[in-house]
């Protein structure tokens, strides 16, 4: 039987193989959605990824019978260690064929790296920060993936569990079918909350008008999620990168911003048309013709993805979400959107899950990170 060898990625050509491996692994899978290829390359470029200013990382490829059969990356976020006291090796970008020898060789590589760094814990799959993709799919293998979720074969979790890794964190995702008619109670409650707290929905005539609200949105994200034990504030460098990375895809109509009578942002939500099929058709590339698929998906689409929501603590549990959802409902009626898929939410984050309770949410996907304590 051939032995599995794992090599560190050190050249541009090897990085290309690392980035493209999942496209070969999932080429016949109708549910897999590729990432943007350029974005995947930029993740490992210190000039493009601000997380590399306070993190260290390596990528590895697994070979068997002279073929690539797996990949994995290891990361240490030193900012997380300094600010939260969490010391661990993160692993991500993990993909492998259905061969226990391959998955074992990959995890052994992570363990060896952790020992070299005198770190006693590994966890993954995850990225550098809590704004990166995280969580191995454990339910929903027959559901179309999204841009912000990791897709993997059904055998992945079994391999990790057989190697002694156990559940660390769990995320849930929901699919909602929006009603044709919004219940009267929501209309009335919406008016009551708006009047009571003197709130208004901001209207944008162009994408450029949104720019001045981007930093307040990041501030609200920090305020909304700072109570979570694993959350680290978003750095200025990250803000700049995310603006440049995602602003080109944002449709102004899909952004809802709520302000008080002093024009201070108190809540926001970002949804986007589903670009999953566009990414599949384009192969993860905008050029030369991929942009056409994204243009079509933005104009005509019966499915949308919920990306971000931020609500100032002073307005949480005060019904502000009713204002947001009324605006989303109005938009979806106009655009012909019938289905909304949420982003991954930590299982214990019940306050976020309550947002969907009036829309018959179906928990169609689950994912988790796995950890291992090294003796």
Image (cartoon, rainbow, N blue to C red):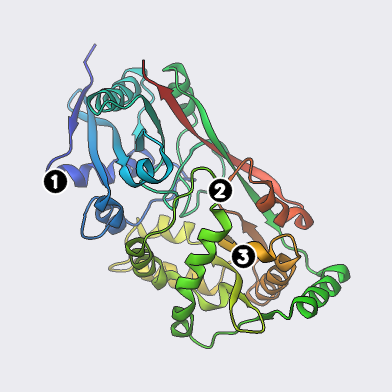
Q: Is residue 25 left or right of residue 175?
A: left
Which residue appears at 25% of the width and 41% of the height? 57
* Snapshot quadrant of residue 64: top left
At which x and y percent is residue 309?
Answer: 58, 62
Which of disc 2 and disc 3 is earlier in sequence?
Answer: 3
The image quadrant where one finds the C terminus is top left
- Look at the picture and state if 195 lies above or below 91: below
Q: Secondary structure at mark 1?
A: helix
With 374 as the anchor, is 2 left or right in this view?
Answer: left
The residue wearing badge 1 is 13
Q: Nearer the viewer, residue 110 or 310?
A: 310
The local crowd at label 3, few if under 14, some if 14 to 19, many if 20 or more residues have their Cα within 10 Å, is some
Query: Which SS class for mark 3?
Result: loop
Tell me the mark number nearer the camera, choosing from 1 and 2: 2
Q: Give the total of numbered labels.
A: 3
- For the residues bearing labels 3 and 2, Cβ distance under 8 angstroms: no
| Quadrant in which the N terminus appears | top left
Task: Count residues near mark 1 (Cα–Cα under 10 Å), then give few for <14, some for 14-19, many for 20+.
Answer: few
Residue 183 location (% of width, % of height): 85, 68
Residue 202, compared with residue 285, is above or below; it is below
Q: Name the residue carrying label 3.
A: 312
Against 107, is 152 above or below?
below
Q: Which residue is mark 2?
A: 344
Among the two numbered marks 1 and 3 on one chain, the one whose residue lies closer to the N terminus: 1
* Badge 2 density bin: few <14, some 14–19, many ≥20, Cα 10 Å: many
Element at badge 2? loop
Residue 113: x percent and y percent?
25, 27
Going 48% across and 57% down the picture, which residue do you hit? 276
Judge left or right: residue 188 versus residue 68: right
The quadrant in which residue 248 appears is bottom left
Whether residue 359 is situated above or below residue 96 in the rendered picture: below
Residue 281 is at least partly visible in this image: yes
């Amino acid at each position: 039987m051939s032995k599995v060898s794992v090599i560190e990625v050190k050249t541009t050509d090897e990085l290309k193989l690392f980035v493209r491996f999942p496209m070969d692994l999932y080429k016949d899978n109708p549910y897999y959605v590729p990432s943007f290829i350029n974005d995947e390359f930029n993740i490992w470029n210190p000039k493009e990824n601000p997380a590399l200013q306070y993190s260290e990382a390596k990528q590895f490829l697994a070979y068997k019978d002279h073929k690539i059969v797996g990949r994995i990356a290891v990361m240490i976020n030193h900012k997380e260690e300094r600010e939260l006291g969490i010391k661990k090796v993160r692993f991500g970008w993990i993909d492998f064929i259905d061969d226990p020898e391959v998955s074992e060789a990959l995890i052994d590589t992570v363990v060896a790296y952790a020992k070299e760094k005198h770190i006693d814990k590994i966890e993954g799959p995850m990225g550098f920060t809590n704004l990166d993709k995280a969580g191995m799919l454990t339910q929903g293998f027959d559901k179309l993936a999204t841009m912000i979720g990791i897709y993997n074969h059904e055998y992945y979790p079994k391999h990790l569990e057989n190697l002694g890794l156990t559940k660390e964190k769990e995320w849930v995702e929901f699919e909602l079918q929006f009603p044709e008619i919004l219940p009267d109670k929501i209309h009335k409650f919406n008016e009551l909350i708006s009047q009571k707290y003197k709130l208004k929905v901001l209207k944008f005539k162009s994408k450029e008008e949104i720019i001045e609200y981007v930093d307040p949105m990041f501030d609200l994200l920090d305020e909304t999620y700072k109570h979570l034990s694993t959350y680290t504030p978003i750095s200025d460098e990250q803000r700049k990168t995310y603006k440049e990375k995602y602003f080109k895809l944002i449709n102004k109509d899909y952004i809802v911003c709520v302000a008080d009578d002093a024009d201070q942002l108190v809540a926001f939500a970002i949804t986007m048309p589903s670009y999953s099929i566009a990414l599949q058709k384009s192969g993860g590339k905008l050029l030369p013709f991929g942009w056409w698929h994204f243009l079509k998906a933005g104009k005509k689409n019966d499915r949308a993805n919920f990306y971000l929501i931020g609500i100032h603590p002073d307005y949480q549990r005060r019904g502000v979400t009713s204002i947001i959802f009324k605006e989303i409902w109005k938009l979806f009626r106009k655009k012909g959107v019938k289905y909304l898929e949420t982003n991954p939410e930590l299982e214990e984050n019940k306050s976020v899950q309550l947002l969907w309770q009036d829309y018959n949410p179906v928990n169609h996907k689950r994912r988790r990170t796995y950890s291992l304590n090294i003796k």
